[in-house]
Image (spheres, coloured by chain):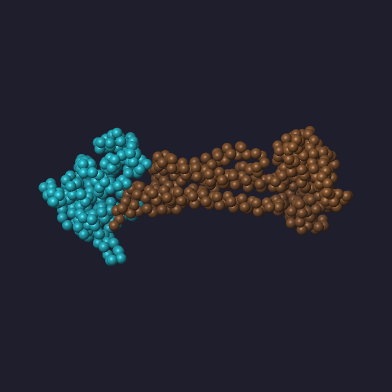
Chain colours: A brown, B cyan
Amino acid sequence: MIQTFSIASYLAVKEVWRNRGRFLLVSLVIALITLLVLFVAALGEGLGNGNREYLSKLDADMIVFQAKSDNVIAASRLGRDRLAAVRRVDGVADAAMIGTSSASLILPGDDEPLKVAMLGVEPGRTGEPTVLEGQQLSTDQASEAIIDRNTAIRSSLAVGDTLTVRTTQGTRDEFFDLRIVGISDGQQFQLQPSIFVPFFTWDRIRSKSEAEVNSLTSVGNVILVKLQDPAQLEQVSQRLVAQVSNIETATLTKAIQALPGYSAQQSTLNTQGGFTLFIGILVIGGFFQIQILQKVAQIGVLKAIGAANPVVAFSSIIQIVVITVIGVLIGALLTFSFSLFFPPTVPIVFNGTTSLIAIIALLLIGPLGGLVSIRYAVRIEPLKALGLSS
Amino acid sequence: MKTYALETQSVIKTYQSESGTIQAVDDVSLQVAAGEFVALVGPSGSGKTTMLSILAALLQPSSGKVVLDGQDLAGINDIDRVAMRREKIGFTFQANNLVPYLTAVENVELMLRLNNKLDKTGKLRARELLARLGLADRMHNLPGQMSGGQQQRVAIARALIHNPSLVLADEPTASLDTERAYQVVETFAGLIHEQNRAGIMVTHDLRMVEFVDRVLLMQDGKLVRIYTGHSEIMELIQGSRH
């Protein structure tokens, strides 16, 4: 076996080296496929992350929605009375209301206002992101804000600065100043950079319809729930639905899947990635098949002088693996180089796990594509290949 | 009783075709001793290439025995046939003889690699053999960088380097001009005699049999005549010129 592998490696490496121009071209094709697959994967990750980043980083076990809102945060409306009821349910360790809305962040000079997700959170409770710089929010009604890293990068605002948000109150645009007390890590929500304000401040300044402007009741979107024992998720969920009227519950994962467009977007990008891999298999398979067809006589000679089938097969496999690995490495380096030049507004995120899965899939396309050609090589009859058959 | 490196007894090879059964080799019995160089000649379709394929363990006879170094080729499985070709037989073919991405010396050493015998002595022998064949300055050339005659000489070195019992050559001069063809066959014959191998050359060019010890003439699949001795062979050559 070692002898077979040794001869096969020798033949494979010699052939690749002595025809390096041709094989490099194939590697470059694989590199381009790698570039495409990694970018599609990174785009999928970036878009997905942009949609779910805030939710996926939440320190909560469950989200309470208004009944029949289909777990869509924007479609759910819950009053403060529900929050008190949720907190009373046995098994709930903590609960906090959050409210979501959009706002325009006014930037100095002639810059276009930055569209941000403005989230109302309860200071000191789940839902308020931990700051990396500065301080947490102080009270429920303070004119303060935490901005996420994306907002900080795109607005050049820093801790201690005052930011101005523009919202629509009925039919009028109004401007509100908030002092930035802290900057958190990336907390995008529905593809927008985020700012976090105390819940009652949020309720005061968020965009409202004419009817809502004069309303005295505070309404948030959902309630985040932390459990005393996360293993009791199902039981607590049942108790919540039974004891608090007109609500439904969902895990964070379910809530993320229910984000508008999230599932469709992810499945579209995954399909694109899958098709690119499939095309890769066909391209590589086609190349190696043509190559085998061109060297039928050469393989015939090898077999006639006593090279066994495993030598021929291993030699082909080693070549395919070497060419694929070189191609994937070049592609990964190209991807990494290009990614350095992308502005932060482009939603591309190179996640280790996603990239690794893509790279493993790419490493498999060569051998998969080459299977047919290897089978063909093994079945070459030396007699026919050398023109000795009658 | 004399022992032969190669012996066949009543070898028959038939093919089925739309027009019926074709008898490509019909009851051929022959013997070749070690150190003997034999030519297998005959017109197109006489069965000489089929016979060569059978002797090369590339084709199973329909019936009969092919005994190489005391072992009947008809009775062994495919894996052993491959091993037999690797260890006991040396080949040169008409064309596409060499592995195109290996240099001359690497092509010769390949036979030693396949037989797990590539050591310092083997490497030295490969270089010496190539030098004897006039290829001292071509050892590191790829086949594409050599002439047809030089490639044939590399193939001869490859056919002999692993000390096979039987050396087979299929039309080794087909793609060469007359002068180079004579040189190649003369060198081939010299090495077969010197190294005490059994050699069989299939050729349609009767001028090339000048250097062999016997000529076996095949016609319609049968072995119809054996020319032995220098004068008989020279007569055959003279006859072919008229």
Residue A9 lies left or right of residue A126; in this view the side is left
- Residue farthest toward the left in the current orientation of the protein: B231
Nearer-the-camera pick, A356 or A51: A51
Residue B29 image position (x, y, % from top left): 20, 56
Residue A158 image position (x, y, % from top left): 75, 34
Name the image quarter holding residue A22.
top left
Q: Residue at x 66, y 53 (%)?
A: A263
Q: Residue at x 11, y 47 (%)?
A: B231
Residue A260 lies left or right of residue B233; in this view the side is right
Q: Residue at x 77, y 47 (%)?
A: A101
Residue A60 image position (x, y, % from top left): 74, 47
Say if residue A333 shows up in the picture: yes
Name the image quarter holding residue A236.
bottom right
Residue B150 image position (x, y, % from top left): 28, 40
- Residue farthest toward the front in the current orientation of the protein: A110
Residue B38 lies left or right of residue A105; in this view the side is left
Quadrant of the drawing holding the C terminus of chain A: bottom left
Say if residue A59 shows up in the picture: no
